[in-house]
Amino acid sequence: MVSDILERFANRLKKIRKDRGLSQEALALLCDIDRTYIGRIENLKRNPSLEILDKIARGLNISLSELLDL
């Protein structure tokens, strides 16, 4: 069973990515992480570490707190 917080984060990440017109691949390049990892986060297959969350926030040029504003 997937936790509510993971689902909410996945939905938030997907919304931010789409609002910026980014593909999973483009976001992954900005964040210096593998494209498949972005997909796995969005599809609730991965629970990202704090280091990955920081890379995503930096790649999106937003604060970690803004990324996690669930």
Image: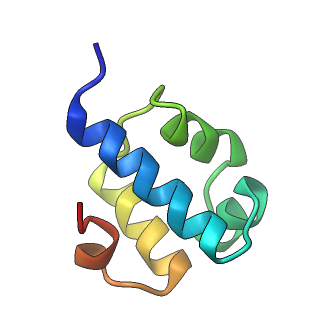
Residue at 71%, 54% in the rendered image = 24
Along the line of sight, which residue is nearer the eye, 14 or 61? Answer: 14
Along the line of sight, which residue is nearer the eye, 18 or 41? Answer: 18
Residue found farthest to the top = 1
Where residue 35 appears, as percent x and y from the top left, is: 70, 48
Q: How is the image coloured?
A: rainbow
Where residue 28 appears, as percent x and y from the top left, is: 67, 60
Residue at 22%, 75% in the rendered image = 65
Q: Is residue 57 left or right of residue 24?
A: left
Where residue 43 appears, as percent x and y from the top left, is: 54, 32
Q: Is residue 37 left or right of residue 1?
A: right
Identify the image quadrant of the N terminus.
Answer: top left
The quadrant holding residue 57 is bottom left
The quadrant holding residue 2 is top left
Residue at 55%, 76% in the rendered image = 59
Residue at 36%, 68% in the rendered image = 54
Q: Is residue 36 above or below residue 52?
A: above
Q: Is residue 37 left or right of residue 64?
A: right
Identify the image quadrant of the C terminus.
Answer: bottom left
Q: State the count of labels.
A: 0
